[in-house]
Image (tube, grey):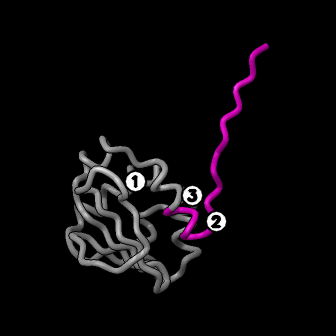
Amino acid sequence: MLTCVTKEVIMTTPQTIFDEMSKRLTKEKAQKINTTYLFDIAGEKWFVDLTKDQDWVKKCDSDAQCTIIVKDSNDWVKLANGDLKPTMAFMMGKIKVKGDMSLALKLQSLLS
């Protein structure tokens, strides 16, 4: 009998989420989205530049086409792990978006 075990990564901190995002991104995904994001998670900032061929995720502050602000890092962890729906989080004021709202809608593909 052949058993296949899928290792699911449990993301418990913003840092592990962005580390995992960096691992999951491909040149093809980056080219498809082709934009820049700034994530402000409880005051810590990560810049995701999908206009480049590699090295997309950096922990720094920079101008971006879309800025995602999450005041509580636990909410970001819940969002990344699928325990909090993005639309619900937005409606509840747990996340805020500055810039192009249509780019925020593409975020799920970054986390998958």
Q: In which quarter of the image is residue 47?
A: bottom left
Q: Is residue 34 depicted above or below 97 in this figure?
A: above
Q: What residue sits 30% from the left and 67% below the top?
A: 37
Q: What residue sits 22% from the left and 54% below the top?
A: 34
The residue that mark 3 highlights is 81
For the stretch drawn in magenta, the main secondary structure is loop
Q: What residue sits 33% from the left and 73% below the top?
A: 38
Left or right of residue 76: residue 103: left
Which amino acid type is marked by label 2?
Answer: Thr
Q: Identify the disc placed on residue 12.
A: 2
CA distance for labels 1 and 3: 12 Å
CA distance for labels 3 and 2: 9 Å
Left or right of residue 50: residue 55: right
Categorize mark 3 by other alpha carbons within 10 Å: few (<14), some (14-19), many (20+).
some
User: Please, what secondary structure does the residue beneath circle 3 have?
Assistant: helix
Residue 10 in view in this figure: yes
Most extreme residue toward the top, as rendered?
1
- Residue 102 in the image: state x and y as whole percent: 22, 61
Q: Is residue 53 depicted above or below 43 in this figure?
A: above
Of marks 1 and 3, which one's residue comes earlier in the chain?
3
User: Please, what secondary structure does the residue beneath circle 2 have?
Assistant: loop
Residue 91 in view in this figure: no
Left or right of residue 89: residue 105: left
Residue stretch rendered in magenta on the structure: 1-18
Q: What residue sits 40% from the left and 49% below the top?
A: 25
Categorize mark 2 by other alpha carbons within 10 Å: few (<14), some (14-19), many (20+).
some
- Residue 101 in the image: state x and y as whole percent: 24, 67
Of marks 2 and 1, which one's residue comes earlier in the chain?
2
Which amino acid type is marked by label 1?
Answer: Leu
Q: Identify the disc placed on residue 56.
A: none
The residue that mark 1 highlights is 110
User: Please, what secondary structure does the residue beneath circle 1 have?
Assistant: helix
